[in-house]
Image (cartoon, helix red, strand yellow):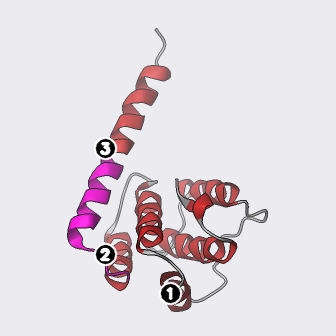
Amino acid sequence: MYLNLFGKEQKELALDLLIYTAMANDEMEDAEKMKILEYCKEMGIKETRYSPVLSLQESEQKFLASSSDSEIKMMLVEIIALAMSDNKVDEKEKDFVKAFMEKAAVSRETMGEILQILKTISYMYENLNSIVFTKS
């Protein structure tokens, strides 16, 4: 959604954060791998990778230090969307999202709004796909 708006260094940090998001529950589902591939394409990263370059702490610190409030919210949207991509958000993924939200100093209200909108978008896509891919 927003990843192409980041600068080159931010894109690499964002990819690390997204990889950590996908691995939050100790496994990367196929749906999450597909999203990582899509994210790399969106960001113009030629070589898709499924392993982070930096530690989680270093990735978070560098991303947060180099990003505006809007960019941090964009990253939060992408993290939540990835966590939701396999249609199940387990406790470890919830904990990961919550920890990033707290480190980024994003309010619970903003987090709730983002989550609600992403759920609505997901629901709308499911309904649209149901219409499009159902034989008339």
Residue wearing tag 2: 106
The amino acid sitting under disc 1 is Ala
Q: Give the prevailing secondary structure in the magenta stretch.
A: helix
Q: Residue at x 45, y 54 (%)?
A: 86
SS assignment at label 2: loop
The amino acid sitting under disc 2 is Val
Mark-to-mark CA distance, 2 and 1: 14 Å
Q: As drawn, is 34 to the left or to the right of 133?
A: right
Q: Residue at x 57, y 89 (%)?
A: 55
The amino acid sitting under disc 3 is Thr
User: Which region is colored magenta?
Assistant: 104-119
Q: As drawn, is 63 to the left or to the right of 108?
A: right
Looking at this rendering, what residue extends furthest in the left direction?
A: 109
Instruction: Give the x, y percent position of residue 105.
Output: 32, 81
Residue wearing tag 1: 65
Which image quadrant for residue 36?
bottom right
Instruction: Work out whether residue 62 or residue 7 is closer to the camera in this orientation and state it.
Output: 7
